[in-house]
Amino acid sequence: MSSLFALAGVLLGAGTTAWADRRRWHRDSVTRLLEIRTAVYAEYLAAMEDTGRALLRVLAATTGDERRREAEAAITAFKLGGVRQRIHVLAPADVIQVADEVMRTMRRARDYVATADQQDIQGLRAMKDTVGTARNRFQEAARRDVRDLLAGTASWET
């Protein structure tokens, strides 16, 4: 009889250890995913900001064909597209969708800068508002994903 209790104790101990290991693995996985996603989201926002500043410098300092080339260079200089591809691998669908919207908006900003009249203050203000709205939507989607990860309700699928 005592060997039966010993066996039950061993099984219970092994089961409890396995359960604790699984919980620790899950917690560590969520922590790693949170760190990775937060870093890529911050990198995307920084690349967007740097790209926007570069486009404004191009608008202010160049003309004609040179402006078109410089606007294209500005959109690629900060690897906005490369970071967006990492978002496609790491983030849930709603964040991916908004990241794609940001990229389309930045391309429209590039096209605007390539052809805009430097004196078109209303057009520039409208483009800045459009870019700002896209940025804000991305920030909100990223925040929602981070909150969901912390709450344990985040999607593990992309």
Image (cartoon, rainbow, N blue to C red):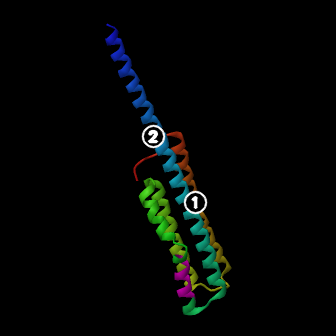
Secondary structure at numbered mark 2: helix
In the drawing, does residue 27 fall left or right of residue 14?
right
Determine whether 23 is above or below 70 in the image: above
Determine whether 42 is above or below 69 in the image: above
Residue 134 lies within the magenta run: no
Q: Find the residue positioned furthest to the top.
A: 1
Residue 140: which disc? none
Determine whether 21 is above or below 130 in the image: above
Residue 26: which disc? 2
Q: Residue at x 52, y 75 (%)?
A: 108
Give the mark nearest the N terminus, 1 or 2: 2
Q: Which residues are magenta?
A: 67-75
Disc 2 marks a residue whose amino acid type is His
Q: Which residue is mark 1?
A: 42
Which class describes the residues within 10 Å of circle 1: few (<14), some (14-19), or many (20+)?
Answer: some
What quarter of the picture does the N terminus occupy?
Answer: top left
Q: How many marks?
A: 2
Residue 74 lies within the magenta run: yes
Q: Find the residue positioned furthest to the front.
A: 3
Give residue 139's quadrant in the image.
bottom right
Q: Residue at x 65, y 85 (%)?
A: 118
62 vs 39, nearest the viewer: 39
